[in-house]
Amino acid sequence: MSQRITITTLQSAVARLNRVAHTDTYTLDAAYGGYRLCQRCRFGGERDLSDRATGRETYSVINAFINGFEHAQLARAIADNPAG
């Protein structure tokens, strides 16, 4: 049986995304029974990073962003410290 995705689960995932990305600009928008990942803009406003979707689909999107940041950080670490 799979884990139930609640708004608390999604908020925790967004908090982790902000930690991994070293920012606090990622937010969760919840309306009409769906969710979407958003980002606050530097000079005001907010932009949508995903379509409105179910909790499980939005959780997958957030985790895709987390994985992307983690892989980019690993690639940078490898490039900065080549073995050999």
Image (spheres, rainbow, N blue to C red):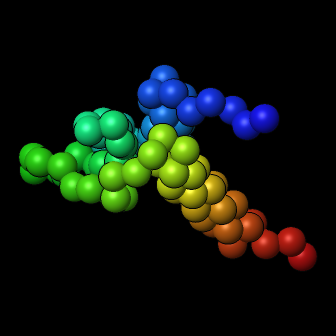
Q: Which residue lies furthest to the left in this view?
A: 44
| Nearer the observer, 38 or 80 | 38
Residue 12 can be seen, yes or no: no
Write the residue at 49% across / 34% down: 10
Q: Residue furthest right?
A: 84
Write the residue at 35% across / 42% down: 34
Q: In this view, does 3 lie above or below 71?
A: above
Tell me where residue 49 sits by quadrant. Answer: bottom left
Q: Which residue lies furthest to the top in this view?
A: 8
Q: Would you say 72 lies left or right of 46 here?
A: right
Q: In this view, does 35 lie above or below 51?
A: above
> What quarter of the picture does the C terminus occupy?
bottom right
Q: Position of residue 13 (x, y in %)?
A: 53, 36
Residue 42 can be seen, yes or no: yes
Q: Position of residue 47 (x, y in %)?
A: 22, 55
Q: In this view, does 51 lie above or below 84?
A: above
| Nearer the observer, 53 or 70 | 53
| Nearer the observer, 81 or 53 | 53
Q: Position of residue 2 (x, y in %)?
A: 73, 37
Q: Position of residue 69 (x, y in %)?
A: 56, 57
Write the residue at 57% across / 57% down: 64
> What quarter of the picture does the N terminus occupy?
top right
Write the residue at 62% across / 30% down: 4
Q: Which residue lies furthest to the bottom in this view?
A: 84
| Nearer the observer, 67 or 4 | 4
